[in-house]
Image (tube, rainbow, N blue to C red):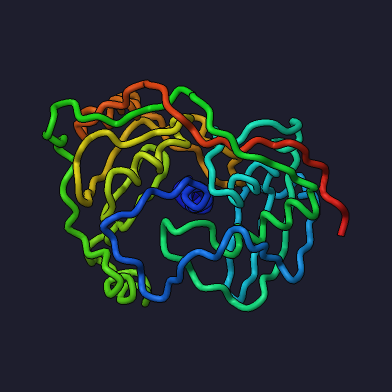
Amino acid sequence: MRTLSLLVVTAIAVAILSAPRPRAQSFAAPAGTVPAPDPNVPLYFEAASVKPSEAKNPGIGIRRQPGGRFNTFNAPAKLLITFAYQIQDYQLTGGPGWINSDRFDIVAKFAGDPPPIIPGSGADHMMLAMRTLLADRFKLVVHRETRQLDTYALTLVKPGQPGPALKPATGDCSPAAFAARRGGPPPAGGPPPVVCGIQQGPGRIRFGGFPLSLFATGISNRLGRATVDHTGLAGNWEFELTFAAEVPPPGALPPGVDPPAVDANAPDLFTAVREQLGIRIDSTKGPVDMLIIDSISQPTPD
């Protein structure tokens, strides 16, 4: 039997791509990246097919492939919108119920092979092309608003004192190190790979090489609210956090994949963050950027 960890990779990749990017950080851009394209200049897929998904197909995801190829499988319109506009689920409101229930397979091709963009600089070429596709094929019309909503704030339990699992980052996340690691996975029996960013799975979060503002952004969709870093801890940090996995996990499981085992002794996420990182997740209110769906239609046929 395969484990759930293999399934989660695609979902977490989508979530991170869709998340609002943190502000400027003390992290050099990886080699080969470029600034984000101008979001006011429309980009297009040179060819795109949009079809309803077959109910028998398991899983859900968005894939980027070499040569400007792009496809989705079993993707609801809500996921396509949050991906295209770099927002979390809680930041999208409006629209009919089918944007959550109806699933679509998209096969598209972007002209050329767009390079990766500098993290935090904005929406990339595929995201902007998806915005155009949603407007053309789904007749999507949206607008933005800022609303005062329930939010979470990360604060230290003891001022100036991180918890036992929270350490200053030691991994090398420089552009040169990124380039050196592109050759493939580390040799068998070697040290675990350096985490540069955030990796989330059932009952486990690994983090490294970034400020805690990225951690706040990374868990906001999991918590269902905008989450901001008020710890006052500067610099880059690393940790591994373990907690009780959500049961059932989000999304449908493919055949042969077991749900995560239930550990009756594992703490919930709020308790784990407090005990292991020395950070409280406090409920508060604050301004949240929202995307409002004014109108959307079932996609036009190919």
- Left or right, 69 with respect to 22, comes to right
Judge by depth and name the residue closer to the eye, 49 or 37: 37
Instruction: Residue 50: name its quadrant.
Output: bottom right
Q: Position of residue 238 (x, y in %)?
A: 23, 49
Q: Is residue 246 visible?
A: no
Whether residue 141 is visible = yes
Toward the viewer: 193 or 4? 193
Q: Which residue is rendered at x = 32% and y = 43% of the image?
A: 213
Q: Is residue 239 above or below residue 136?
A: above
Residue 302 rendering spot, x and y as whole percentages: 86, 60
Q: Is residue 242 above or below residue 235?
A: above
Residue 193: image x %, image y %?
Answer: 28, 62
- Residue drawn where x is 37% and y is 21% of the image: 284
Q: Residue at x 53, y 28 (%)?
A: 147
Which residue appears farthest toward the front when viewing the image?
Answer: 40
User: In the image shown, does 149 or 182 lie closer to the viewer?
Assistant: 149
- Seen in the image, is 193 located left or right of residue 62? left
What is the tally of numbered marks visible in this picture? Answer: 0
Name which residue lies at 27% across and 52% down.
208
- Left or right position of 98 against 12: right
Where is residue 13? Give x, y as percent.
49, 53
Quarter of the image for residue 156 reads top left
Q: Quadrant of residue 280?
A: top left
